[in-house]
Image: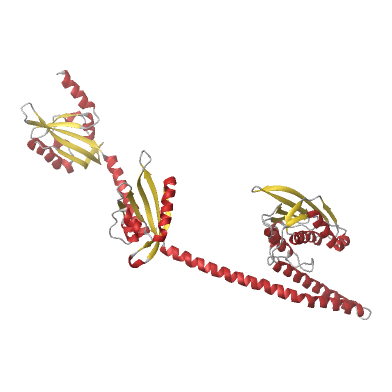
Amino acid sequence: MHPNTILLQDIADNTLLPTAVYTGDNLMIVFANQAMTETWGRGKQVLGRTFSEVLPDSKKEYLSNQALSVLKTGIPIQARDEKVEVSRNGVILYYYFNYSFIPLYDSDKNIYGVLNTAADVTELHESREKTLKADERLKMAIDASGIGTYEINLTTREVVSCGNFKQILAVDELKDIDVLISKIHPEDLAVRENAHREAEITGLISYEARIISSGQSEKWVKITGKIIRDLNGSPQTIIGTILDINEQKKFQEELKKQVAQNTEELRRSNDDLLHFAHIVSHDLKEPVRKIKFFNNLLKNEAQDFIKEKSKKYFDKLDQSAQRMQNIIEGILAYSTINKSIQTVEKINLNEIFENIKTDLELIIKEKGAILITRELPDIQEAPILIHQLFYNLIQNALKFSKPDQPPRVTIKSSIIKDNGSDFLRIIIKDNGIGLDPVYAERIFNDFERLHSKDEYEGNGLGLSLCRKIAKRHNGTITASGKKDKGAEFRVSLPLRQSRSAI
């Protein structure tokens, strides 16, 4: 055998592309490389047999006729993505092939055989099927969601879009980007231009605009997109979506109106309530004062004639009047704290606490209380409110003392940093009846009482007022403690206020 013939034989035998040659009207197999025999699911014993003998029954006649047609006419046949049965270990499997039948000519240019090549494209076929199904599912999802999709060629300005896109824009034809721009409300064109300018940097487009439909009616849409660039970084294409948000916009506008209306009504109601509380509390002060005065006067004048049991009634009446006075004063303070503007000025906290000690002198002496105060820095706040804040806290510490132990109140401070600003933290710690951690937050609620009014006097507004004052100064107040182990209040206030009044 000629060396060139041997070389060609070796090449054909070892190539991965299934290859075979058939001759004669019965298409006898005169050559089949290993790749082809494996495709048929057979060995080298196929040589000398006919093509139809190695073919699966379902394709026997079809493929044989194609090969014979090439043998007789000389017209090659090429097929793509053809489904073929293949027998592997006695099991019939289905594969997809691209194959060809090519006529072979002798030196006299007569057809003597057919060259058959094939390529297994099963994986490619399955991938294509999955892609098509995924695309179909995506299209169905997009159609169901009401979203429109578009693709703009920035060179030709041509627009390719789905049905929803045209439906949202209310157009039959969308040849180029100018049609899209013409549908945008003139007042919203600047919004679009700004979005596209930003997209030159970010690559992303997102804006809301009104679309003018037939009859000059308007509806809101949300347009998003992404700029696709070429290898040189030049913008080539924009792909994106459009969504009809008209109903959503209507709902938002209606919600804004309702919120604004409800807020105004709530503000008016709150103002009326605070005004009512102030008037009622102010008007009640004088009658309560007179009840206390005449009760004491009557008790003093008749003390030699009344029984001990009756004296207890006078005491009960005096206690009730005192509680009523406390409630009235608390409501007055609570209802007026936000009604007036307070001037911010430099405060000497040491003087504030000395004044509070003077105000509480009687109860301090009565209980034998000890107040330990360390040197405190100056601070910029509203003096009246700060005095009220710490007065309430110290009075609270003295009130909730243990009956068998003198109150001991320690006041110390430190400067801390919070979000880059300087804050003064003041800690007021006592040795009183303590605080269950469960109630550490609840005690700042309006009218919250953890003890009965018979055990401890109060109106339930003191600590609530403290929190309002701290918040008004852009500060915070928290509480902690344990039952029978005392309580601790932490107040954080800015060293300096950014405004001259609060």
How is this picture coloured?
Answer: secondary structure
Residue 384, quarter of the rendered image: bottom right
| Quadrant into which the N terminus falls | top left
Residue drawn 56% across the image and 69% down it: 262
Q: Position of residue 147 (x, y in %)?
A: 37, 57
Residue 13 versus residue 213 in the image, above or below = above
Q: Position of residue 48 (x, y in %)?
A: 13, 29
Residue drawn 79% across the image and 51% down it: 376
Q: Position of residue 339 (x, y in %)?
A: 68, 67
394, 98: nearer the viewer: 394
| Quadrant into which the C terminus falls | bottom right
Residue 498 versus residue 34 in the image, above or below = below
Residue 394, quarter of the rendered image: bottom right
Looking at the image, residue 169 sits to the left or right of residue 53; the answer is right
Report whether residue 481 is seen: no
Residue drawn 67% across the image and 71% down it: 274
232, 144: nearer the viewer: 232
| Count of all numbered marks drawn on residues in the image | 0
Residue 144, quarter of the rendered image: bottom left
Report whether residue 61 is seen: yes
279, 300: nearer the viewer: 279
Looking at the image, residue 62 sits to the left or right of residue 268; the answer is left
Residue 1 versus residue 166 in the image, above or below = above
Q: Position of residue 74 (x, y in %)?
A: 9, 36
Q: Residue furthest right?
A: 304
235, 261: nearer the viewer: 235
